[in-house]
Image (cartoon, rainbow, N blue to C red):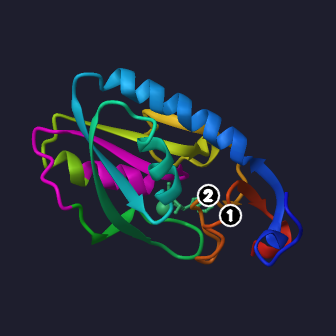
């Protein structure tokens, strides 16, 4: 880790380093390229958390891709998500009859992606899959698993590489664990 700046002073430890991120993302890209070979796929970045993962991942995909963006927010009190998801920005592309890959930062309780999946399935895509950089299966409250996962992580609050703590720290180049004293 670099010296203690305002950014990394809240970080307890690095959970996934830049090198580990890039190595695994290259593997995921190769796997997706194989699975979607000969098809074209709409890759949907879920803003804002997936921004770096999406950008790095699609550059490892060798199949035909269209890139689109959605911004969603979950209503909930405090750190719990309610499962009621508001689409703040919808994608621009029509997905009916198309292959769609949702690219998200993390699956926690699973409520957000379960709801999003239901919304997108109603538009009748040819296929709909979920690729998450991180998965916290111990926190799951619904019956859903990502089709592709970068790293399975323990039940700790993480930040960096797109993930925020109070809307900051998304520009840390690695995934770190938040120091316990910052976590109310
Ligand atoms: P879920 O609906 O509980 O699966 O919530 C998923 C959303 O919660 C993610 O898209 C993140 O925005 C946020 N989230 C869950 N865990 C963390 C974490 O450890 N750090 C930062 N954001 C998180
Ligand atoms: Mg998110």
Q: In the figure, is residue 17 to the left or right of 113?
A: right
Residue placed at 36% from the left, 67% from the top?
A: 72
Q: Which residue is mark 1?
A: 172
Q: In the figure, is residue 124 to the left or right of 40?
A: left
Q: Which residue is mark 2?
A: 161
Ligand 1 falls in quadrant? bottom right
Compared to residue 131, the image places residue 36 above or below, namely above
Residue placed at 10% from the left, 38% from the top?
A: 97
Foreground of the two, 120 or 61:
61
Determine if the magenta segment contains residue 42. Answer: no
Q: Where, by quadrant of the figure, is residue 101 drawn?
A: top left
Compared to residue 91, the image places residue 24 above or below, namely above
Residue placed at 70% from the left, 39% from the top?
A: 20
Compared to residue 31, the image places residue 166 above or below, namely below
Compared to residue 184, the image places residue 38 above or below, namely above
Residue placed at 50% from the left, 47% from the top?
A: 56
Q: Position of residue 110 (x, y in %)?
A: 47, 50
Mark 1 beta carbon near ligand 1 (under 8 Å): no
Q: Position of residue 116 (x, y in %)?
A: 32, 54
Q: Residue furthest right?
A: 3
Foreground of the two, 52 or 164:
52
Q: Is residue 25 visible?
A: yes
Task: Find out whether the residues at labels 1 and 2 contact each other: C-beta distance under 8 Å.
Answer: yes
Secondary-structure class at tag 2: loop
Q: Position of residue 13 (x, y in %)?
A: 84, 55
Q: Label 1 to label 2, Cα distance in Å?
A: 5 Å
Secondary-structure class at tag 1: loop
- Mark 1 neighbour class, 10 Å CA radius: few under 14, some 14 to 19, many 20 or more: some
* Residue stretch rendered in magenta on the structure: 92-118
Sequence-earlier tag: 1 or 2: 2
């Amino acid at each position: 880790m670099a010296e203690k700046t305002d950014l990394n002073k809240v970080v307890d430890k690095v959970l996934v380093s830049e090198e580990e991120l890039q190595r695994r993302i290259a593997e995921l890209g190769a796997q997706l390229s194989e699975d979607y070979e000969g098809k074209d796929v709409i890759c949907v970045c879920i803003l804002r958390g997936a921004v770096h993962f999406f950008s790095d991942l699609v550059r490892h995909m060798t199949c035909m891709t269209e890139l689109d963006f959605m911004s969603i927010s979950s209503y909930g009190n405090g750190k719990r998500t309610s499962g009621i998801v508001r689409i703040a920005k919808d994608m621009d592309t029509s997905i009916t009859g198309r292959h769609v890959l949702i690219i998200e930062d993390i699956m926690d309780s699973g409520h957000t992606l379960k709801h999003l999946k239901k919304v997108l399935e109603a538009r009748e895509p040819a296929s709909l899959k979920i690729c998450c950089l991180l998965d916290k299966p111990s926190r799951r409250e619904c019956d859903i698993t990502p089709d592709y996962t970068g790293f399975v992580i323990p039940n700790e609050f993480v930040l960096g590489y797109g993930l925020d703590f109070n809307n900051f720290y998304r520009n840390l180049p690695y995934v770190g664990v938040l120091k316990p004293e910052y976590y109310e």
